[in-house]
Amino acid sequence: MKASVKWTDGRQFVAESGSGHSVVIDGPPDHGGRNTGPRPMEMLLMGMGACTSFDVLEILEKSRAPVSDCVASLEAERADAVPSVFNRIHVHFTVTGKGLKEKQVARAVELSAEKYCSASIMLVKGGVEVTHSFTIVEE
């Protein structure tokens, strides 16, 4: 896997993935940015959320669960001192579908957290406390 990050101005960068997709990353004005994109740590948090959501959806679809929507809401706590690393991250899934079984959703979240989500597992191995919860919304 490869990526490039090019500085454009102030604290703004354009990051390009090896698969050819680009995203603007920027800092807040009080740090020389113009607020034109997410902060680097926000990108890390969003990436983890997408990684675990990808897994949960794939696991549920393979088990033929009737999922129509899935939203992962993440909240992170960062250290007060530099480096301001993540100490804790909580991921709450809101999974919508018709006749979803609690056991299926719980198992999908558990498998993602413990076996499949590379981003989440990497952060846990780095000392971040990552927790999960979910709500099922009946259609």
Image (tube, rainbow, N blue to C red):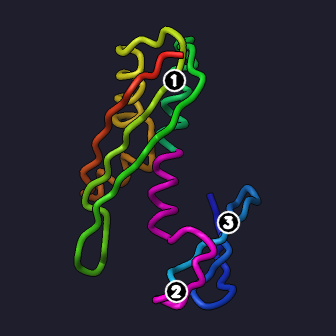
Q: Is residue 116 above or below residue 46?
A: above
Side of 118 where 8 appears, left or right: right
2 or 1: tag closer to the N-terminus: 2
Q: Residue furthest right?
A: 20
Residue that carries the numbered disc 2 in the rendered image:
29
Report how many numbered discs are placed on residues in the image: 3
Identify the magenta region: 30-50
Secondary structure of the residue carrying numbered label 1 = strand
Residue appearing at x 52%, y 62% in the figure: 43
Residue type marked 1: Thr
Q: Is residue 72 magenta?
A: no
Q: Amino acid at mark 3?
A: Val
Report the residue at 64% width, 66% height from top. Answer: 3
Q: Which residue corresponds to mark 1?
A: 96
Foreground pick, 61 / 121: 61
The image quadrant where one finds the N terminus is bottom right
**Quadrant position of residue 136:** top left
Identity of the residue drawn at 76% across and 60% down: 20
Q: Read off the residue under disc 3.
A: 23
- Residue 36 percent coordinates (x, y): 63, 75
Q: Give the x, y percent position of residue 12.
A: 62, 82
Indicate the quadrant where residue 15 lies.
bottom right
**Which amino acid type is shown beneath numbered disc 2?**
Pro
For the stretch drawn in magenta, the main secondary structure is helix
Rate crowding at label 2 as few (under 14), some (14 to 19) or many (20 or more) other CA atoms within 10 Å: few
Helix, strand or loop at mark 2: helix
Mark in the foreground, 1 or 3 = 1
